Image (tube, helix red, strand yellow):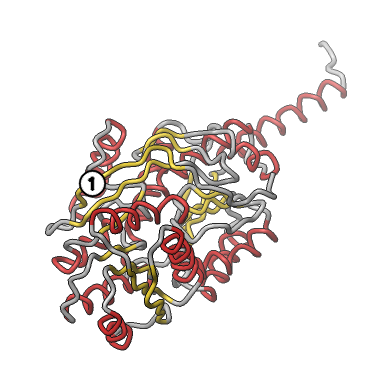
Amino acid sequence: MKRISTVAVAAAWLASIAIGQTAAYAADPIRIGVPVGLSGANSVVAPSVVQSAQLAVDEINAKGGILGRQVSLDVADDGSGAAGAQKAFDSLIFDKKDNALISMETSAARNAGLPIVSRGKVPFIYTSFYEGRSCNRYMYVDAWVPDQQVAPIVDYFMTQKHAKTFFLIGSDYAFGRGMLDFTKSYIEKKGGKVLGNEYLPMDGSDWTPIISKLQAAKPDAIITSTAGGAPNVTLTKQLRAAGVKLPYGNLAVDEGTAKSMGTDAEGIYISGSYVTNIDTPANHQFLAAMQKRFGADLKTPNDLSVPEYEAIYLYKAAVEKAGSVDTAKVIPALAQVSFDGPRGTIRMDKQRHTPLTMYLGQVQADGSVKVIESFKNVDPGAQCPSLK
């Protein structure tokens, strides 16, 4: 009988362990955390964000996953604020051991979560439009900033509505103040004048004193920037009840929230990177897939949920380019990949932000948005010049 050397046996044994470890590794899912405001101000829009994430993961898994591994979602309620975000980020990064975080949040929640992202060293794709210039070595953004969004509304009001004076209303936190600071500067640069600049706490709901100041000021137009979701609803409803009929530009309302407002939203001017009636094959395919997946439970896709869908595909592309989920390899890859989605080609290569086609639109009686004008590949401007 032929003797088998102990070296050969040991080699075979080590090989079998390596094969087993590789198979086990391949079977482990890639985990994506979605911290989002299921309660609080963002609760109106958060369900649509989760649905977009679910569709992206379903589609990716149906085609073999990422690097042969299935993808799983961990959704955590951040309460739309700082305290809830700290708990959600900590749980997703250190308890769930998620490989990446991808989600829209209020700016307060994002700012509270970023130090935890830095400590955990995980990629974070922020999918919410925001006030701009929030920079972190682990964060990329695939949504618009004021450099891309404000000009269409202000320019239209000045040229088409002959507005020279404006009144600004916002939620009192980073997004509301950041957006309206930029807007005020832009209005003044264009020769207009801001007659008032008023804020209400993010969880506030009584806008009566501010509306009284608006009526006393007698501006030509109003522009608002509130926390996405509930504050949009309460402010708009109270403006309508007070009989305010001025040209009204809203820097924070999305199409889904507009539909939830009913007739109160009719006539609002918005500027954003996504509306459901974008007439492209990619958008038609996306909307059909959403309808098939969620049926009667479908929440209206919007400018806060569609970037979530695209961001998960961008993360997939970056991991595949890197050949690994290792953060040190994925972070530079995120600036080198692109995805052709419902909004067109998305590439986060402009200081970790992305050029976007922007749409100026007006909300119709049924909550849909009529596009007035589009602006191709609007640059996000200088956002994070110090980050490589």
Q: Which class describes the residues within 10 Å of circle 1: few (<14), some (14-19), or many (20+)?
A: some
Q: Identify the image quadrant of residue 279.
A: top left
**Looking at the image, is 53 positioned above or below residue 222?**
above
Is residue 311 or residue 100 the one in the foreground?
A: 311
Query: Which residue ends up furthest to the front in the rendered image?
Result: 191
Question: Is 175 positioned to the left or the right of 371 in the image?
Answer: right
Is residue 344 or residue 292 the one in the foreground?
A: 344
Question: Would residue 87 be visible to someone looking at this image?
Answer: yes
Is residue 252 or residue 6 the one in the foreground?
A: 252
Q: Where residue 13 sits: x, y (%)? A: 76, 29
Q: How many marks can you see?
A: 1
Quadrant that contains the C terminus: top right
Question: Would residue 39 be visible to someone looking at this image?
Answer: no
Quadrant that contains the N terminus: top right
Q: Where residue 355 sits: x, y (%)? A: 47, 41
Is residue 208 or residue 352 the one in the foreground?
A: 208
* Residue drawn at x 53%, y 69% as measured from the top left: 85
Query: Which residue ends up furthest to the top in the rendered image?
Result: 2
Question: Is 89 positioned to the left or the right of 236 in the image?
Answer: right
Query: Which residue ends up furthest to the bottom in the rendered image?
Result: 209
* Residue drawn at x 50%, y 43% as measured from the top left: 354
Question: Is 312 positioned to the left or the right of 164 in the image?
Answer: right
Q: Where residue 228 sits: x, y (%)? A: 37, 66
The residue beneath circle 1 is 371
Question: Is 162 positioned to the left or the right of 323 in the image?
Answer: left
Q: Identify the image quadrant of residue 375.
A: top left
SS at badge 1: strand
- Name which residue type carries label 1: Val
Q: Where residue 248 sits: x, y (%)? A: 26, 65
